[in-house]
Amino acid sequence: MAVTKTLLVATYSDLSKLDAMRKAGQVYVDKGTDLADRLADFILRSADVDGWHGKAQTAAGNRADQLAGHARAIGSKFQDIGKAQLVGADAMVEPLRIAEECVTQAEGRKLFPMVVNEDLTVSDPNLEAYRQNWEKLGYSDVAQRVAERVNARARIEARLQEAARNCEDALATCSKAMSEGIQLALDQAPVLAALNQAQAAQDAQDVKDGKPLTPEQRERLRAATSLTKEQQQALANGGDADLPPQQMQYLRDLSRALDGKTPGEIKALADKLGIGPELGNALELAGSEHVTSTLPKLGPDGKPAAYERTKGGVDQLPSKVREAVTQAGAHWEQVGGNNRVPEVQLSVEHGQDLNDLSSILQQSDNQVRQNSSLDGALASRAKEIQHVAANPPKDMFGEPAMVMGKEQSDQVVQNLLRTVAPDHEVVHDQLQGTDGQAFLSDLTHYKWSDGGFAAGELLDQSEGANAGGHQGQLAGESERTVADYFAAHGELNSWGGHTFGETNPDLAQSVAHGLKPYFADMTGSPLATHGDTFGKTPFDTPDAFEKGLSTNAKQVLATLSTDDTAATMLKEAANQEELKLLDKMADAQHNGDRETAKDFLEAAERTRALSDRGLYDGMEAHYKDADEASKHEFATKNAAWDSLKAFVGTGAKAVPGIGTALGVALDAANSPMKAWFLGDSPGAHTPGSAPHENPVVFKGMVAQALLAGHPELAQGNPLVSPDGHILSEEEWKTQVWQNTGSASEPRATTDPRAAYKIALNELLNKVAPGYSDLTDLTQGTYNTTADNNGKPEEKPGK
């Protein structure tokens, strides 16, 4: 609400308005909870419990208890509204007094008054008359008096504006409390208005019988199978979602109504009635130990005698669903061949039930399925079945038997993996558990019929990477477990005679996508942001990055880079990290901190060399030919370069400090920046070598980074194009050097390459004095001979 002069003056002149606001707040405080209690008591007394019999009587009593509980909750919120209004009214008294004083001070002058405008700005139309008056009186300090009047006007306006802001804050406090109270009422309205227990029993029966549901029944079903934002947040934070008694009872009635029906029959009902999402939610909520409530315990007379805490769980699910999620398993059957060379097929008990159940649950809301006991049971079944699938029996020669019908058994596990993947708590616990490493082995040392797509959905837990809090912790710890596993299992690049990317390309891509937000943490960059969430210890040894011996990071990059798409993702992450490091280098240099600038520059070099080494190793393993590996490495760098341009193009905001000069440098076809990021063309590059082996390219890149945000440092310099990018050597030759030199002013050198180097050194000396020779910068490389087991060559990497 905008505070105006009229509002301030009118309110202060009639403070009874504040008194009315205060009194209304006091009514909320004094009467809100009392009225809610009286309403709750009325509901309990007036409920027609005696008009029902048996289960219907219990249902009517439960309904009354549930409605009474909601009435009390809303009453408590009204009390909060009242407290906010009391605080707001009191907070506005002093700002109003100050505002009145300011208006009087400005406009209450007998001679030459100022004017307070409606928007609380202060104007001084009489300033000139004021000045002339003092000149007429012959005072010598007229200018000083005029200046004092100008300052007085500014002070009055500043005090007015501050008073208005204080009033706005007080009003905002009241408004926020009011809106929260209204929102609570709206959130609870579906339950308050819809969940009549007798109707709930009828709803459950109609769903069981497959009868068409009325709009009112659909709305009740939707309300009963949904969670409020607060309940969703409680689950996301690793806690419990507490349901109103009536909602929990509705879920249990629905679950009991479906007893005896197989998952396939429940799926058929969901499809027929169009209630797949609702039934999926109902099963997840009923089957979660972290969904709790308080339900009445009936006495001998059938009336509530006490209340007890209760929770969901697998034991609350329909009987046939419970059987499927607790009894499913797998075993091998011989279907052909002979005893020497058998043909076997994996038989999955309750396989079709699990497929049908997965189909239902995949329609449910991800927000209701955090730390669900049902998801936990399904994940355990997936793990057990996959362990059998990944270890087929041997023939008499010790080789795996010929597996038949693999797609059918794969489908069951794939459906289960996709179903539980959004439950970050369950996935985290499975990966971190005592048999988590065996689970990862069974997922990765296996040729999936879908290319590893479903397993990839499970292992990509990066959704909460930047969420912070509990979800951020889960994501970081899960991704660290995955990264540690890939670092320790270099044999994945030769398992089964194929590379990891060849065997399961979709799995490689998903793992790369999951690790992408943690690239800086994984490679040891000084800009790593996830702290302890990606592990309390460095991914490699603390000094590995500085020595060029990041063996673990290199192994992960090499394994995943055996798929071109995954390789591009990781190179994109490397490029973005390098750009951020160069930005930090430039900031430090411009702030006069040369040592810090050097550290960031060296980190950018090592990041590029490390990512190049991992990329090339993956490409070489995949293509098994050095020339082909170089070609595909360069193609991947080009694809990642295009992505980097988009990264900066959408955000100079995404990389704080990146300015126009760097943006155009990335767009320029032949800029030193591009040459540095892409490296040498195929066949000319030594993988993992120093990024600045070509000092001209390196210096040009450094100069371009230093010009980002400071284009004025290169004003008029012929080496810098009008759009801000540094000319390449060829551009310099054709656009500048060929147009210089004459008989009267001969060139300093007849060698254009030497002239270009001289011009580049002069530019560097201008943007960063002392950088022209770069001799004091580390000239090291990423240790290219460190093998996958971390055995470096004797000479250090720097």
Image (cartoon, helix red, strand yellow):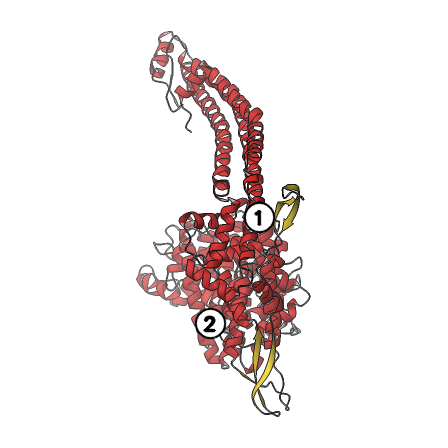
307 relative position to 114: left or right: right
The answer to whether residue 786 is visible is no
Q: Position of residue 274 (x, y in %)?
A: 42, 58
Q: Position of residue 432 (x, y in %)?
A: 65, 62
Q: In the structure shown, which secondary structural element does the residue marked by tag 2 occupy?
A: helix
Viewer-proximal residue, 696 or 761?
Answer: 696
Q: Is residue 305 above or below residue 671?
A: above
Q: Position of residue 742 (x, y in %)?
A: 31, 61
Q: In the structure shown, which secondary structural element does the residue marked by tag 1 occupy?
A: helix
Q: Position of residue 455 (x, y in %)?
A: 54, 68
Q: CA distance from mark 2 to mark 1?
A: 63 Å
Viewer-proximal residue, 523 or 718?
Answer: 523
Which amino acid, mark 1? Lys
Tell me the residue that label 1 is attached to.
55
Neighbourhood count class around disc 1 (C-alpha, 10 Å): few under 14, some 14–19, many 20 upward: few
Tell me the residue that label 2 is attached to.
564
